[in-house]
Amino acid sequence: MEKNTCSWPNSKPLDVIYHDTEWGVPVHDDRKLFEFMVLDAFQAGLSWSTILKKRENFRKVLDNFDAAIIARYDEDKVQQLLQDAGIIRNRLKIRATISNAQHFLGIQNEFGSFDSYIWQFVGGKPKQNQWKSMEEIPVSTAESDAMSKSLKEKGFKFVGTTICYAFMQAAGMVNDHTINCFRYKEVQELKC
């Protein structure tokens, strides 16, 4: 029997796995949150499918998204990354990743964890939306606007409201599975 699902995975294997196991699941691990921040920034102007195909390479060359290591990357590392066809070779996004890692560490110091800071934008628990179709899902909300503004004030780059909303979806801050999707209730019932 075929399961009802959101329409966006389009039968692409990596998209389907991501949709069925990760998308919308609340994340509270700082390393994983930083991974989503980085990947969503690299996604700007590209498809999520492209990012998923390169995700393992990103993990490898970006020291498994360890912000403390990335924050210390030098110009030699930037040049090395620019030569790596396994990732998105965009100079601005690579430099932003390093700068964002430094600001990420600053937030950890200020708030005790990035998790404590970032989840404040949804009051500490996932927002349970009730979309009937993918067309209803917004690309930004008041919450993503506030997150974008705050992150920019803290020095982050590639954190516009649309990128922030995609991050919120990835990190499970919002449940944007359509109500007919088999994952909607499963994600809704997860303990945050």
Image: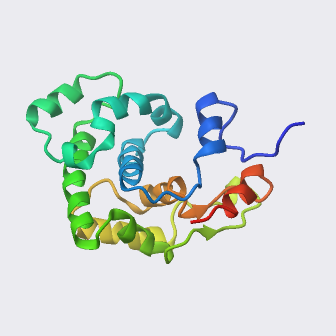
Q: Position of residue 15 (x, y in %)?
A: 60, 36
List x then y, in percent, for residue 14: 58, 31
Q: Is residue 42 above or below residue 192?
A: above
Number of disc labels: 0
At 77% from the left and 50% from the top, the residue drawn is 182
Instruction: Answer above or below: position of 32 versus 114.
Output: above
Location of the N terminus (image quadrant): top right
Question: Can you name the residue that lies furthest to the left here?
Answer: 75
At x 44%, y 69%, the residue is 119
- Which image quarter is the C terminus in? bottom right
Query: Quadrant of residue 62 in the image?
Result: top left
Query: What residue is shown at x 64% (from left), y 30% (from top)?
Result: 12
Q: Nearer the viewer, residue 134 or 76?
A: 76
Q: Quadrant of residue 190?
A: bottom right
**Residue 178 visible somewhere in the drawing:** no
Rendering coords of residue 156 (x, y %):
26, 59
50 shown above or below 126: above
Q: Residue at x 42, y 42 (%)?
A: 43
Direction from residue 130 to residue 22 in the image, left or right: left
Asked whether the viewer can see residue 29, the reply is: yes
Left or right of residue 47, residue 132 in this image: right
76 or 159: nearer the viewer: 76
Residue found at the far right of this picture = 1
Q: Is residue 115 left or right of residue 23?
A: left
Q: How is the image coloured?
A: rainbow
How far across and down, in percent of the image, does residue 187 sit?
67, 57
Near-viewer residue (165 or 13): 13
Q: Is residue 183 above or below residue 109?
A: above
